[in-house]
Image: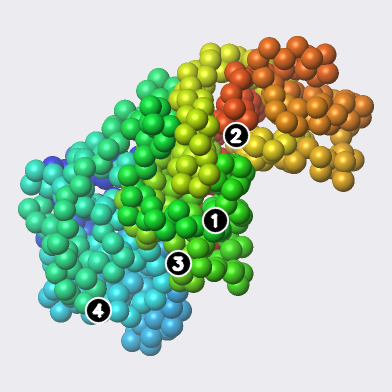
Amino acid sequence: MCGIVGYVGRRPALPILVEGLRRLEYRGYDSAGVALVDQEGLWVAKSAGRLYVLEQQLDFTAPQTRGLGHTRWATHGAPTEANAHPQLDASGRFAVVHNGIIENDRALRKYLEQKGVIFKSETDTEVLAQLIGQLYDGNLERAVRQALHEVSGTYGIAVMCTFEPDVIIAARKGSPLIVGVGQGEHLLASDAAAILAHTTQVVYLDDGEIARITPEQLRLTTLDAIPVTKAVEEIEWTLEQIELGGYEHFMLKEINEQPEALENCLRGRIDLAEGTVHLGGLVDCARELTRARRIILTACGTAWHASLVGEYLFEEMARIPTETEYASEFRYRNPVIDDGTVLIAVSQSGETMDTLAALREGKQRGALTLGVVNVVGSTIPRETDAGVYLHVGPEIGVASTKAFSGQVAVLSLLACYLGRRKHMSAASAMQFITALSQIPRQMREILQRADEARAIAERFGEHNNWLYLGRGFNYPVALEGALKIKEIAYIHAEGLPAAEMKHGPIALITEGMPVVCIATAGVQYEKILNNISQVRGRGGSVIAVATEGDKEIRRLSDHVLYVPDTLEPLQPLLTVIPLQLIAYHAAVLRGCNVDKPRNLAKSVTVE
Ligand code: M6R
């Protein structure tokens, strides 16, 4: 959603800030702004709309070597130039960029108005800027600290002022911030992508911390001014990973990266000789996990679909009762968490507000908490007791693709890990992880036939209603296929457990309606063939995803997309790929903005 970038150093700041903002575009935003600062004053440019609109007003030869940039996703007030960040105080000497929401902004606004402050925007951020301006007595850090003691809500903020132009004060509560460490320079960002071109050495801020950043020095303290010492860490992502690299869209790049991403995800974790799985992040809680009596998986969107695969995996392989909960529901219910409950938060970004809140709720009620997260150093893994990273590399496209397969792969590893601690024999674990290690190669085979999925998109791309049917492990894949085509091609689609169709949705089927049926080999194969006949009997066009070598399916379906054979619990890793490709090509053919679909943000950090 919103994005922050800051720079204090020796180089002209503006190109660095704008490049950083460009790299944050994928997160979604509706206005943008920059501020440069020196002793003379603050120089600010803001605009509603895309970054290129802002760029038209900028003089890239500006000499200032300090500044802030922001992309805003409107919450308080419309996406206008006035509401864009940086927000200034009344004197025009203090600039604030802010991610998050100040909850008591109305009370603070009233208080400041009574003191004669005239507001220029509708934002909660301006309240903070005005408050800092009022509290300043010659020390910016102290003014920010005092202001933050007055506010409730969430924030990742960066503040600069003309009185101390060498200094950025940054603070975090519930909204991520990273300080990049360079030679005679420091950068600040809400997302590593913004600074990766300049440094891979970073310090992650935790909630309740304030950073005082100058070109030469980074000093961390708590909100109560207690010094904090932290190690500089290395970001494992590379610049190539966040660039298009010849692809037309990040989504297509990330679909194609899945074989390599899975190799990275599995590397060092599979022990074929021993028939076991090593998950370094779980070492400290191995004993507690062995005693787990119930698992709750909690997530949103695609991560929820991956979690549902996890539920099937845990019950099948580890025989542990498991539920998958929408994080947004879980956090406001009165969930029963008893002794032996393990709560697993699954998230690509590690910042999704609902998932984070569900995690906190589970933790407060005594659950052992694990994170299955992609972004290293993000909030969820910082708050869980233990966890497993996906290691699939940065996902830039708003539509989650390689994160889904990474999540399913990690949950498969975890199911095997737990299974081995319960009743699973080394032989069956060996069979499972051998099949898992084949998945990247099998994914490559599917990707080589990507044209077949494209042909389906060409044939049916104009239809505005689709159904996706699956059973067992492929039921969550049906949900995921439907979500993909909805979010990027703006096609209405429903994903269903195939047998549910006859309880209502079958009424929707009309002549030629595309119905994607995942009909791979497995215990429910015959059942899904019956569902296919029911669809065809009503005139629907069946697009089957089937196991290579299945000739019968050709006779029963209008179109077949084959995937290689694997164990049933691992099929989602393969069957999802044709569905991702269909959604991608349908979106391109319909002229949609694939990587930045309307109304969507990559990471949903508000309710
Ligand atoms: O970062 P997270 O995995 O927590 O995000 C959860 C959902 O917001 C996300 O999966 C969303 O549904 C994607 N747009 C799906 O493609």
Distance, label 2 to label 1, CA atoms, is 18 Å
Instruction: Kindly identify which residue carries mark 2.
Output: 569
Q: Secondary structure at mark 1?
A: strand
Q: Position of residue 385 (x, y in %)?
A: 37, 59
Local packing at callout 4 (Cα closer than 10 Å; few below 14, some 14-19, many 20+) is some
The first of marks 2 and 1 along the sequence is 1
The numbered mark at residue 363 is 3
Between circles 1 and 4, the one closer to the viewer is 1
Q: Please give the name of the residue rendered at 21% of the width and 77% of the height, measured from the top-left corner.
A: 224
Q: Can you see residue 80?
A: no
Amino acid type shown at disc 3? Lys
Q: Position of residue 476 (x, y in %)?
A: 65, 40
Instruction: Kindly identify which residue carries mark 4.
Output: 146
Distance, label 3 to label 1, CA atoms, is 13 Å
Mark 3 vs 2: CB contact within 8 A? no
Q: Is residue 484 above or below residue 303?
A: above
Distance, label 3 to label 2, CA atoms, is 29 Å
Q: Position of residue 161 (x, y in %)?
A: 19, 65
Amino acid type shown at disc 4? Gln
Amino acid type shown at disc 1? Ile
The numbered mark at residue 295 is 1
Distance, label 2 to label 4, CA atoms, is 54 Å
Between circles 3 and 1, the one closer to the viewer is 1
Q: Quadrant of residue 165?
A: bottom left
The first of marks 3 and 2 along the sequence is 3
